[in-house]
Image (cartoon, grey):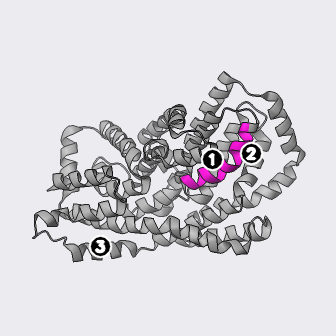
Amino acid sequence: MSKRLFITLAVLLVASIPIAVVLLFSSMVPVFWDSSFPAGAKYLLRQVVSGLDSTPLIAIATFVLSGIIMARGKISEKIFNVFAYFIGSKTAGMPCAVVVTCLFYGAISGSAPATVAAVGAMTVPILLDLGYEKKFCTALIAMSGGLGVIIPPSIPFIIFAMISGASVGDLFIAGIFPGILIAVCLMGYSYYYCKKHGEDKEKLKVYAGEIKGKGLGRLINEGIWALLSPVIVLGGIYSGIVTPTEASVISVIYSLIITIFVYKTLNISEMYSIFCESVKAYAPLLFVLGAATALARTLTLMQLPQEISVMIGNLFDNKILLLLAINILLLFVGMIIDGSSAILILTPILLPIVSTYGVNPVHFGVIMVVNLAIGFVTPPVGVNLYIASGLTGVTVLDISKRVIPFILATLVALMLITYIPKISLLLVG
């Protein structure tokens, strides 16, 4: 019966059926073949409803709203100018400033596509004016945008916490060092690229002079409010003052205050369209979450995780090979399924397996999210590729080729994160 379920799941995914329909229909496969199976239609419907009866879902909705408000308020520009002031005139300084801006903007939006769109729309034209190759710039922003789901607050971390029972706060704090490590690897390749292919030093000198002409005090005064956003949100969570859900509401209020009243880059009249955009981004996820809950319950009743655990235990006799195999699986899955859906499908199956090998659930959550962040730039599903392509006009195929060195740099970080748990768990109490 389990084979029939997975065949159904695979066929429907290949047929490009909406993921929520795929999950819900697959969860009903056992009933089609065995009418005595306890997970009937009414039971599964109750599971769908119960799956949506969760407080962390509010955090996802409000972080999505906060990220859209920040994007409309052009916050990325304020952040970029601060980093460009300090490193813009150095070798690979401007590409590195883009990476760091994505790192900080990810701490505001919690979304990889949102980070690509917001940061890319502002920084890519600047890089092109400074003489950097268009394909390199497009690949850079597509890959760097993936930091949006690793650095906290992260929507995939919230989803993993809902499925696994791990602490959202622990997952958030566990994503800090891995996010920084990946950013360092991306900047390392950017430095190598710029040393090999050269830069237009005259244009860089002129642009850096314009940035410095604004004065450090002015730039910090403009950028400090944007940079304080993740500090306030994450500081509130880690200090125990607020829960992640409460912090997400604070994030919305803070983003409204600085965009409307401080920077004055957003009008109140735009709020209706912002709310509409938030609903369009969030509503489909609800259907997927509910359907995934039903499928997870079906898998549990079939005792499938236990069967897979025994099978994998027979194939791999040590944790090193097991984690390597899981990384390969996750990288492949990330190519064909979006990250949130993959977390919902695979966590109930893989978490019990790695737990028997002593892998910390929080550490495994970071491994999953980093793997699936790479999926944002691997075709055919790689969302970041399509967004970056829309920004510059470079074809998805060309971006896919030029992003390979960035992926290799990220894989180096992934291996370190996988086999050195302290990178993720050092700050976790």
Question: In what quadrant of the picture does the N terminus appear?
Answer: bottom left
Q: Which residues are magenta?
A: 113-128
Q: Secondary structure at mark 1?
A: helix
Q: Which residue is mark 2?
A: 83
Residue 273 figure quarter:
bottom right
User: Which circle, 3 or 1, is nearer the viewer?
Assistant: 1
Q: Is residue 341 magenta?
A: no
- Total labels: the figure holds 3
Measured in 3D between alpha carbons, the distance from the residue under mark 3 to the one under mark 1, in whole angstroms, is 40 Å
* Amino acid type of the residue tagged 3 in the rendering: Gln
The chief SS type of the magenta part is helix
> 231 or 146, which lies in front?
146
Residue 240 visible to an observer of this rendering = no
Q: Determine crowd level at label 2: few under 14, some 14-19, many 20+ residues with C-alpha closer than 10 A.
A: many
Residue 49 visible to an observer of this rendering = yes
User: Which circle, 1 or 2, is nearer the viewer?
Assistant: 1
Choose the circle earlier in sequence order: 1 or 2: 2
Q: Is residue 116 magenta?
A: yes
Residue at (43, 45) in percent of width and height: 371
Q: Secondary structure at mark 3?
A: helix
**Above or below for 115 versus 165:** above
Q: Which residue is mark 3?
A: 47
**Label of residue 391 in the image:** 1
Residue at (60, 62) in percent of width and height: 234
Residue 98 figure quarter:
top right
Choose the circle earlier in sequence order: 2 or 3: 3
* Amino acid type of the residue tagged 2 in the rendering: Phe
* Amino acid type of the residue tagged 1 in the rendering: Leu
